[in-house]
Amino acid sequence: MEKYIVIHGPNLNLLGTREPEIYGSTTLEEINEMLYNEAKKYNITLEIFQLNSEGEIIDTIHKHKNACGMIINPAAYTHYSIAILDAIKATNLPTVEVHLSNIHTREDFRKKSVTAEGCIGQISGFGSHSYILGLNAILNKNQNNKARK
Ligand code: DQA
């Protein structure tokens, strides 16, 4: 079975109670449940991680470099982690970046994503549904790439 990974970055373990007016009231467990259900429809294996530190995120990307793709919400690291950008580039792991909130309508420091430069694309602003859109986007991309071969 094809394997995909999902990485939730720092503070996302607090979803549900963390600034619900921005991030919604859906918990991380509920988001993961939605993702596992979506994965079942496509007969793929999904491994999901929530990591608060940059080094652990980088190690996890390295460890899963042979996966078919990754959905990542780097959270605050989005805005300044060149190390995570480099890990995505170094592994060539096809990646979609997702955000619950629309980072482009928030504070100026959130409008810039350094990590998106290494990604196929970015989905931002659809709440928990951003993750489902991200998974669908990468599956679709991989399907199209296969058809072309
Ligand atoms: C976030 C947006 C980031 O700016 C913020 O630091 C987060 C969550 C989002 O999903 O909307 O932690 O990535």
Image: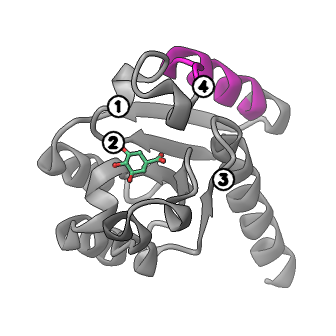
The answer as to whether callout 2 falls within 8 Å of ligand 1 is yes
Residue 77 visible? The answer is yes
Position above or below: 79 against 27: below
Placement of the N terminus among the 4 image quadrants: top right
Q: Along the polypeptide, which appears first: circle 2 or circle 4?
A: 2
24 sits to left or right of 10: right
Residue 134 — which label? Answer: 3
Q: Secondary structure at mark 4?
A: helix
Position above or below: 127 against 93: above
Query: Could you tell me which residue is drawn at 25 percent across and 64 percent down?
Result: 84
Q: In this figure, which colouring scheme has been used for the structure?
A: one colour
Circles 2 and 1: CB atoms closer than 8 Å: yes
Q: Which residue is mark 1?
A: 50
Mark 3–mark 2 Cα distance, whole angstroms, equals: 15 Å
| Nearer to us in this view, 81 or 40 | 81
| Nearer to us in this view, 12 or 136 | 12
Circles 2 and 4: CB atoms closer than 8 Å: no
Residue 82, image x and y in percent? 21, 73
Q: Which residue is mark 4?
A: 31
Circles 4 and 3: CB atoms closer than 8 Å: no
Q: Which residue is mark 2?
A: 9
Label 4 crowd (10 A; few <14 / some 14-19 / many >=20): some
Mark 1–mark 3 Cα distance, whole angstroms, equals: 16 Å
What type is the residue that disc 2 sits on? Gly
| Nearer to us in this view, 124 or 88 | 124
